[in-house]
């Protein structure tokens, strides 16, 4: 597939522009600053966790 990079987040592929949706990646901290909330999938190896992420609805 031939493409031309205009910007790291925007590529033109076959004459059409790929969409890019606003997202957030967050680390939720406890008020004591010593704990945080992490996510975990069942398929993760033991001891592996992840920060939370999601799509942002613009204008809200």
Image (tube, rainbow, N blue to C red):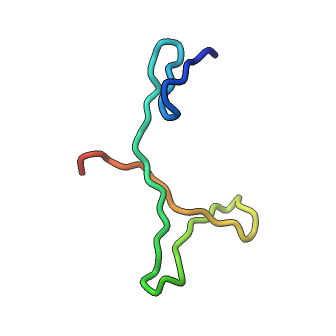
Question: In percent of the image, x 70 and y 66: which residue is there?
Answer: 48
In the picture as drawn, the residue positioned furthest to the left comes out as: 59
- Which is nearer the eye, 49 or 32? 32
Name above or below for residue 58 compared with residue 48. Answer: above
Name above or below for residue 11 compared with residue 33. Answer: above
Q: How many marks?
A: 0
Toward which corner of the image does residue 45 lie, by quadrant? bottom right
In the picture as drawn, the residue positioned furthest to the right comes out as: 45
Residue 15's spot in the image, x, y percent?
Answer: 48, 12
Q: Is residue 12 left or right of residue 57?
A: right
Question: In percent of the image, x 64 and y 66: which residue is there?
Answer: 49
In the picture as drawn, the residue positioned furthest to the bottom comes out as: 32
In the picture as drawn, the residue positioned furthest to the top comes out as: 15
Question: In percent of the image, x 43 and y 48: which residue is there?
Answer: 23
Toward which corner of the image does residue 44 lie, by quadrant? bottom right
Name above or below for residue 11 compared with residue 51. Answer: above
Residue 38's spot in the image, x, y percent?
Answer: 56, 69
Split into 4 quadrants, where in the image is the N terminus?
top right
Residue 47's spot in the image, x, y percent?
Answer: 72, 71
Name above or below for residue 12 compared with residue 42. Answer: above
- Which is nearer the eye, 6 or 43? 6
Question: In percent of the image, x 46 and y 71: which residue is there?
Answer: 28
């Amino acid at each position: 597939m031939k493409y031309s990079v205009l910007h790291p987040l925007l590529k033109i592929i076959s004459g059409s522009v790929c969409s890019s949706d606003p997202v957030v990646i967050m680390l939720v901290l406890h008020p004591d600053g010593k704990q945080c909330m992490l996510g975990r999938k069942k398929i993760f190896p033991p001891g592996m966790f992840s920060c939370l992420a999601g799509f942002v609805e613009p204008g809200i």
